[in-house]
Image: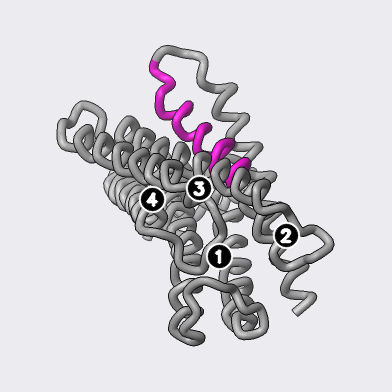
Amino acid sequence: MRGVVIVSALVTLLNLALSALVGVRLLLRARHPQSGPEIALAVYFLGCAVCGSTLSITVYSSLGDNGFALTEETTRLLVAAYTLCNSIGGSAIYVFTWRTFRMGQTWPIALVAAAVAAIAAAYVHNAAGGNFSVAVLPGPAYWVERGVFLLGMVWMSIESLRYWAALRRRARIGLAEPLLCNRLLLWGVWAATVCLLASSDLIARLAYVWMTGETVTLLVDEAMPIIVVTVVATSIGGAVAAAALWLTFFPTRGYARWIESRHAAQGAG
């Protein structure tokens, strides 16, 4: 178990560092009036993937280590903070997908507005009811926020893969760059993987309730099998996400040459 925890920690740190790097790079690029998509994506990476994840890790780490226990008030403040980060980041994903893939169309505006409204309503509901606490089965506002977040990631993945398929057809006749085409594929894979990683928390909670019948208290010994499976699965998924994200934004020369040679070989065939 110790080895699994170490690997999971390393993968988590890698994704945090990579998200920060990508977020800062996007902010540095956002210097012109049409930089809405870059800013929205930077908000996701810096606000949700970095700040939100760090706060969440702090809260849940304190539950498993009595030497790092937090007061109830501090826990509530941190839960409120990382929920806000996740809410803003989830909203930013909708804005990015709309501005990048569906700009000029009407129906995505309604989808984005509905998603942002639902996320905001969920947060206000939690704030009004003082529901920012750690619970096995959080209230309905939690499920609304997570469901809308997952829908945004699914939408972004579908749009990326749809655009990749269109560019791949163009690349075959020399009207699109093979590396750009591949980066869209990687971006779609990253978004789909993040969606699966986010789903793991929901699945783990429901599995715990099904196995123990407990909906309020986390019984560590009873939850350990679920924790181990979840940690292993998220470590593998996190490694895939990190690789896809790195190659999307920072493709190495060797990787770029491989993509070009593969494209040339397919063209020759």
* Residue indicated by mark 3: 260
> The C terminus is located in which quarter?
bottom left
* Residue 145: image tag: 4
Q: Is residue 227 magenta?
A: no
* Residue 237: image tag: 1
Identify the element where label 1 is drawn: helix
- The mark closer to the camera, 3 or 4, is 4
Residue 93, image x, y percentages? 40, 40
> The N terminus is located in which quarter?
bottom right
Identify the element where label 3 is drawn: helix
* Residue indicated by mark 2: 62
In the picture, measured across the screen, residue 266 lies left or right of residue 236, that is left
Residue 268, image x, y percentages? 39, 55
- Characterize the magenta stretch by its predominant secondary structure: helix
The CA distance from mark 1 to mark 4 is 22 Å
Q: Earlier in the sequence, mark 3 or mark 2?
A: 2
Q: Residues within 10 Å of mark 4 (few under 14, many from 20)?
A: many
